[in-house]
Amino acid sequence: MKPKALLGLLLLLNCELSSCTHLVVIPGSSLELPCLPFQTGYTGAAITWKFNGEDVPVTAQSRDSPRVRQGGLYLSLSHVTAANEGDYLCLIKENGMEMIRTYHITVLVLFMYTVKVFEGSTANLPCHFPPSNEVKTDAIWFKETNREKRTQLPLGDNNSRVEQLYPLDHDQAILIRDIVEEDAGNYICQSPEGQSLSFVNVIVEVSPTAVPHSCSGFTTPWETCQDENSRTGQPMLQESITGFSMKLYSFLRESQPSSNLLFSPISISGLLSHLLLGTRGDTRKAIERAVSVPHDFHCVHLQMKKLREKLASSLQMASQIFYNPKMNLSRSFTNQSIQFYDAEPTRLLETSEENTQMINSWVANKTDNKIQHLVDSVAPSTQLMLLNAVSFNGQWKVKYDAKPKKGLFTKLDGDMVTVPLLYHPKYMVALNYIVQLKAQVASFALTGDASLYILLPHSSKVTGLQQVEERMTETTVRQMIEEMKTTSPQQVEVTLPQIRLNIQADMNMLIKKLGLSSLFEDANLCGLCSEERIILDDARHRAVLSLTEQGVEAGAVTSVSFSRSFPSFSALRPFVMLLWSDQANVPLFIGRVTDP
């Protein structure tokens, strides 16, 4: 039985309104605060209200502003938000006498959950920081031992059964593995400042009799693509890859709001599509949702093959399977891997050192030595490792000034660093302001039917970058591409920083964010191997990209391991970049530069 989460909202009123001075309410509530706790004859008294020391205007400033009613005898609050939290003071003056009544309003951002889970399984306890919060420190989790005492959970202890899913992320959920009866009870998630964020009641039920592993009904090969020449298959895959790309970018920017970012969505999509060949049941549906393809899109693997062939002139994309010799791979999976992904399975060798060298050599070969190291070691328990590598090499169609130049790049914190530059006084480039993204966008044509798009926010501050990133969706990005294609190139004075990014994204975090946590716990990989239960042990993705006088060079590799104004454009402040295949109409690399 999988954990069930029941969501509820909590409203607490500490006492009756007639005598209460401290109110705890949930967002969206409506309140009416009486100035006096009793009916009064102060009909001619001068009554004023203050909120956090400031006078409340007699006429409401907006629909959600506090409203003074009946000459000040009541103050109404509708649709309470965090902005309404604080102290309210009512002052009555009449015949030389003053009377004061105060209220303190606390807006409670607390969610209540009930999680039911079987003994021996894993419980997911939810908790989130408000979207407006900047996450600098993780939340603190407690378990109530009785009504007056609670114990803090050891989140940083490697030997603990408790694991924080996404450190320094708005999502502060935790996992408790191998649940036992003693784990039942109440759990509280708090911000470092002591604000309660969620309350979770865990109910542990007796585990039913274990069902033996069986792949009965799940061993048939992947369905045949019935319409190989369909005109809808290619646009469907293009749309899914773009949507998948924006989903990945949103996850990465949430977990890393200010650092350099780089990943290859086509590499990660290629890897998960390859793995999709061997998944069945709910695991197959989960991966299909993750990569944004319909469940009945049986031609996804054929379209991935056609996409790879179309990109062959500029992008080399390769897959490989390394497996334990004692493991019996499904013949249909092996054949279809060769058919669609040109990946003939390779047996792992006897020692960890030999396997590490073999895998890193394969990675270096497939990325033209841009990435020479992906794994430090291969565990003896490893049964299966899937890899996908991509390598791109595009030349500028117009060469930059070969004379070395340097300039100052302004970082998000305002600091300035000296960087080598790419400069051209009259570069032919399409330049436009894209209203939907609130960014100035430049499109640089590259050899190999590709374009480099640089999205420059209106300022070097964090808010400027966040505005652009929040607006980056599949729809707005595709609209940007179409609009830039119709923008005529012109001579533009161009200044770019020379950069070289080499970044390893947190693939384990991405897989969980994509809703694929079951791969780590109870995956249905019966189409790959029907004899044993296999779960995800590790996932890796590394991407490199360089901007030099010669052009753009990029490489990426993804792996999962199973074991058990004036025409000028100066990008000398943080920007987002998108390497796009014009021929295949899909994103190849997406990145963010905040510190070159």
Image (cartoon, helix red, strand yellow):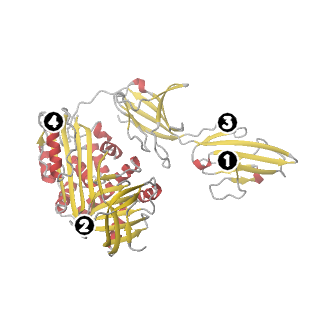
Where residue 341 sits in the image (x, y, percent)?
16, 52
Q: Which residue corresponds to mark 2?
A: 396
Marks 3 and 2 sit apart, C-alpha to C-alpha, by: 71 Å
> Relative to 505, is 435 on the left or the right?
right
Circle nearer the N terminus (2, 4): 4
Q: Amino acid at mark 3?
A: Cys
Q: Amino acid at mark 1?
A: Asn
Give yes or no for contact between labels 3 and 2 (Cβ–Cβ under 8 Å): no
Closest to the camera, between mark 2 and mark 4, is 2
Marks 1 and 4 sit apart, C-alpha to C-alpha, by: 66 Å
The secondary element bearing badge 4 is classed as helix
> Relative to 313, is 195 on the left or the right?
right
Circle nearer the N terminus (3, 1): 3
Q: Which residue corresponds to mark 4?
A: 353
Q: Which residue corresponds to mark 3?
A: 15
Circle nearer the N terminus (1, 2): 1
Please rate how many residues cluster around mark 1, counting C-alpha atoms within 10 Å: few if below 14, some from 14 to 19, many from 20: some
Q: Which residue corresponds to mark 1?
A: 52
